Image: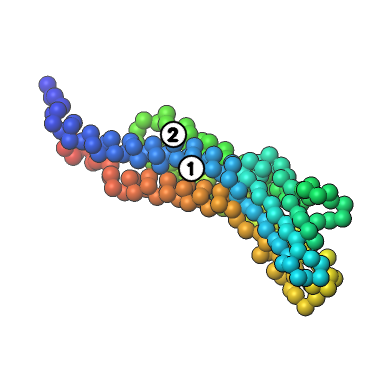
Amino acid sequence: MTMDDPGSARSESPARTGTRRSQTLAGPLGFFLLLLLFLFLPSVAVSCSVPPGTQVGAGTATASVTGADVITGSDPGLETTGSLRLPSQKEGEPLTDAVAPGQDVRIAGTAAVVVMALGLGLMFIGVWRPRALLTVGIATLAAALVAVTGILFVSQLTDEAKEYAEFMVYLPDGKGVDVVGRAGEVVHLGVGFFITLFGLTVIAVTNLVLLLRRKPRSPGSSA
């Protein structure tokens, strides 16, 4: 009868423990934290300002859209002040229907959230190698979907900013300035986008390193 060597089991436990900890942080726990950050931190932001001293006067237009806004199709509104506030707007009232995500943005954002949520189910997979393979796949797919969401949304808001800028070329301060060409400068990706994308990349790379460092044993190798 063959018995396991207790000393061998003890010598392998630190490596196994380290692998489990890595797969927990760069796995279900990591997906959970990134999911929260994506939902509640700004993914896309709009910021535009007219400096004092211009003929139209100073003004600002700002908006911040979270991942939750993206998947629900919510419009947080465009906060405008001064010369950038429309005549029909009341003081402190946001401009609605200005930064609402389009259908393609909502589909991509919802898919990214669903894929990250699938990563939470990895806690039920006890075998480390299949778990690592699935983690790499889920993190890579989620990162791609987050990137597509950001690119589509920035493109949408840039087109809307250009339409708005076409009216500004007729203002005295807009003459001689490529207002339409510079409209894209007011739209940029937010901190939630970058943190989520970076975190998903770290999760994928961490599990890929684990797979490369701990190669499967051949059937004839000794324990």
Residue 77, image x and y in percent? 74, 47
Total residue callouts: 2
Secondary structure of residue under mark 2: helix
Is 17 drawn above or below residue 175 in the view shown? above
Residue at 56% in and 44% down: 38
**Residues at marks 2 and 1 touching, judged by CB atoms closer than 8 Å:** yes
Residue 139 in the figure: left or right of residue 185: left
User: What coloring was used for the rendering?
Assistant: rainbow
Location of residue 167 by image quarter: bottom right
Is 85 drawn above or below residue 57 in the view shown? above
Is 137 drawn above or below residue 123 in the view shown? below
Residue 58 marker? none
Residue 3 in the figure: left or right of residue 44: left
Location of residue 11 by image quarter: top left
Alpha-carbon span between mark 2 and mark 1: 10 Å
- The answer to whether one can see residue 111 in this image is no
Residue at 59% in and 53% down: 190
Image quarter in which the N terminus is found: top left
Residue sitting at the far top: 1
- Residue identified by numbered label 2: 122
Residue sitting at the far bottom: 176
Identity of the amino acid at label 2? Leu
Residue at 72% in and 70% down: 181
Residue at 55% in and 52% down: 191
Identity of the amino acid at label 1? Ile
Query: Quick one: label 2 or label 1, which is nearer the N terminus?
Result: 2
Residue 57, image x and y in percent? 79, 65
- Residue identified by numbered label 1: 138
Residue sitting at the far right: 88
